[in-house]
Each structure stands twice: as C-alpha cells, then as structure tokens.
Amino acid sequence: MSRIEKLSPEQWDPRIQAAVQPDEATDLEHGLTRFFAHCPEQALGLMGFGGALKANRTLPNRLVELVRLRIAFFNQCRSCMAIRYSDAVADGLDDELVCSLEKPADAENLSDAEKVAIRYGELFATDHLAIDDALHEDLRTYFSEAQIVELGMTVAFFVGFGRLAATWKMVEELPASFQNLDKPIAPWGEDSIQVR
C-alpha cells in the first residue's frame, strides 16, 4: 500500500481535472498526480514543467525512454520500470532494446548517441560528480548545447521524481513481478504496461 493517500480524480482541484482529463486514463496512468493533487498549486506548476519538457522535446522519444528506464533501475522506482510510453514504442523502443539496458555500453543495438545519453543519466543517478568534461565532450559529439541542457533537465526530472515515487511505494496496481519490495528488480525481462 502506498505511503501517501491517493486522491481519486473526483477529489482533485478542477484545474488538475481539466489538465489531466482523468476519464481518459487508468488509475495507473494517473500516477503521481493522485498524490500531487494534495498540493494543487505545486501540482499544476510541476505539470507545466513536465508538459513543457515533453511537448518541446527535441531529443528522440526512444532515447529519452531508454534513459528513463535505466534511471528507473537505479531509483528502484517500480512504477517507472513497469511503464513503456507509446511515443517511445512508436519511435522503435521494444523489449530487445529494454533488455540492452542491462549492459548498455556493450549493446550492439543501441546507437552511440543513445549510449552516451544513457551513461550521462546513469551517472546523474549514481555519481553525479563523476560527470566530467570528457563526458560533456562525448555528449557534444551527438547533441547540441540546447539538447544537452534538455537532457540534463529531463534526467533531473526522472531522478528526482522517480526517487520520490519509490519512497511512496506506488506498487499495488503494477504486475506482481514489480510488487516485491524485498529485492532489487530491473525493467528488462519483466512484464510492462504501455501507457499513452
């Protein structure tokens, strides 16, 4: 059971209801909104930021999803690991690619750009001070300055809110393989849920 009370859509501020359109999504798709609804002003601000990251994305959806899933492993965010976003699936994400995240540096089906972005996200989640000039130069090989900033903001969003979700134990709607909190799990080789 989650550590924070989930608010049902009927309990949400009308502005959150209008932004999310809860009748068009499942409880799982409502995700953290069910918790953030306790603080409507902050929730709306966060939704604006998250929406801007997605709506104005210049990075490929597949790359962003691969980075997100690798970070989810380090965060041990069960809901983050269970979800596959449909825009990334449409951009070529499949189970084989997700399985490559176990050892991304050795994966033959990941591009060099994806590998360096995944490495950046991994270090951000595990040892952020190890992100050095050399890694930034590697990023510049594939990404513009604006895209590196976009990647950094996106990764910060994933690390911070993935860790928050993990501490709130949002697992009851997930497949059984994601509900066991006694041992670390990974997003590769497990059941997944596709979200629009």
Image (cartoon, rainbow, N blue to C red):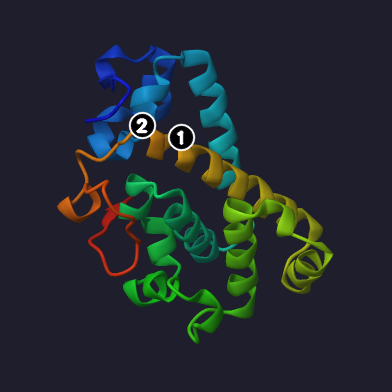
Using residue 185 as the reference point, say whether residue 40 is left or right of it. Answer: right
Q: Position of residue 168 (x, y in %)?
A: 36, 31
The residue that mark 1 highlights is 164
* Position of 185 relative to 108 (above/below): above
| Amino acid, disc 2 | Trp
Q: Position of residue 21 (x, y in %)?
A: 34, 28
Q: Position of residue 175 (x, y in %)?
A: 18, 51
What count of labels does the image hold?
Answer: 2
Using residue 128 as the reference point, say whether residue 68 is left or right of it. Answer: left
Q: Quadrant of residue 7?
A: top left
Give the residue displayed 34% in from the left and 15% down from the top: 12
Towards the viewer: 19 or 139: 139
The residue that mark 2 highlights is 168
Q: Residue furthest bottom?
A: 108
* Position of 7 relative to 185 (above/below): above
Give the residue displayed 29% in from the left and 54% down from the top: 183
| Amino acid, disc 1 | Leu
Find numbered disc 2 in the image and state the secondary structure of the residue it sits on.
loop
**Res 131 seen here:** yes
Find numbered disc 1 in the image and state the secondary structure of the residue it sits on.
helix
Name the quarter where the N terminus is drawn.
Answer: top left
**Res 56 seen here:** no
Give the residue displayed 39% in from the left and 46% down from the top: 77
Cβ atoms at labels 2 and 1 below 8 Å apart: yes
* Position of 10 relative to 100 (above/below): above
Using residue 142 as the reference point, say whether residue 60 is left or right of it. Answer: left
**Residue 102 — which label?**
none
Crowd tier of the residue under label 2, counting other residues whose Cα lies within 10 Å: few below 14, some 14–19, many 20 or above: some
